[in-house]
Amino acid sequence: AQTVTQSQPEMSVQEAETVTLSCTYDTSESDYYLFWYKQPPSRQMILVIRQEAYKQQNATENRFSVNFQKAAKSFSLKISDSQLGDAAMYFCAYRNRFNFGNEKLTFGTGTRLTIIP
Amino acid sequence: NAGVTQTPKFRILKIGQSMTLQCTQDMNHNYMYWYRQDPGMGLKLIYYSVGAGITDKGEVPNGYNVSRSTTEDFPLRLELAAPSQTSVYFCASTGGAKGNTIYFGEGSWLTVV
């Protein structure tokens, strides 16, 4: 079974600075997806960024980028130029790509990010 | 552009009551999921479905039942509600192998008293 670990329950960063959230995972599969979801106080789950395991290039979305290290099974999220609206819980998630019948999304326990004005 | 729609958004149940959380998606997705999120915790999978007529248990299925009679709908039934089922429930869906983005509903806040 796949597991996702987020070792930082809480993080804080000064506004306009850069912060990196850590995520590691365990799987025996070679082809899968990795995600970062943001959950603001409204509890809505918002997709931040997605990485396909077969792509070596790290995904980027504006101020958000990932450092995907497949051999190390590491998938960290970097937020540049942090803004007050970035304050939220951030969840790392894993999903098999072609394991039909087992297309579950497995979540980490989350990292609460606080932005300091 | 509705996406994934959950109802109700808020509900208070008494211990022993039953209810159904409704979930519907208009994206023709094969895969649908129910998660629960307890305060300060991550999401745990309750049940999932890979297509109409097919459902399977996730990590925490006890006390719940699901059905999938159509591609669009995936209701979650709570039988004999218990305080331990107080949580926020999320329905989600995704397409097949190429549809790798998972879309979430806005959540249903359930309190059992």
Image (spheres, coloured by chain):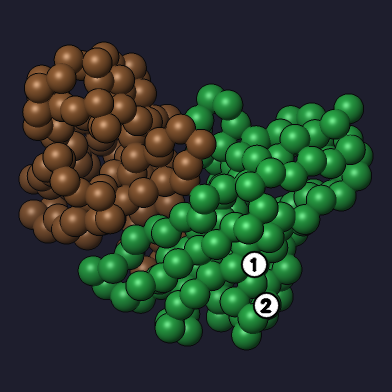
Chain colours: A green, B brown
How many numbered callouts?
Answer: 2
Q: Residue at x 84, y 41 (%)?
A: A13
Name which residue type carries label 2.
Gln
Q: Which of the two labelled residues, at mark 1 and mark 2, occupies the earlier sequence position?
A: 2
Q: Which residue is mark 1?
A: A75
Q: Chain of mark 1?
A: A
Q: Chain of mark 2?
A: A
Q: Residue A88, how many percent across, how many down? A: 65, 35
Name which residue type carries label 1.
Phe
Q: Are marks 1 and 2 on the same chain?
A: yes
**Residue nearest the observer in this picture, B70 or A12:** A12
- On screen, A76 above or below B91? below
Is B12 placed left or right of A77 in the picture?
left
Q: Residue B7, how many percent across, how many down? A: 28, 24
Q: Residue A4, how many percent across, how many down? A: 50, 63
Is A58 placed left or right of A105 in the picture?
right
Q: Which residue is mark 2?
A: A69
Quadrant for the N terminus of chain A in the image? bottom left
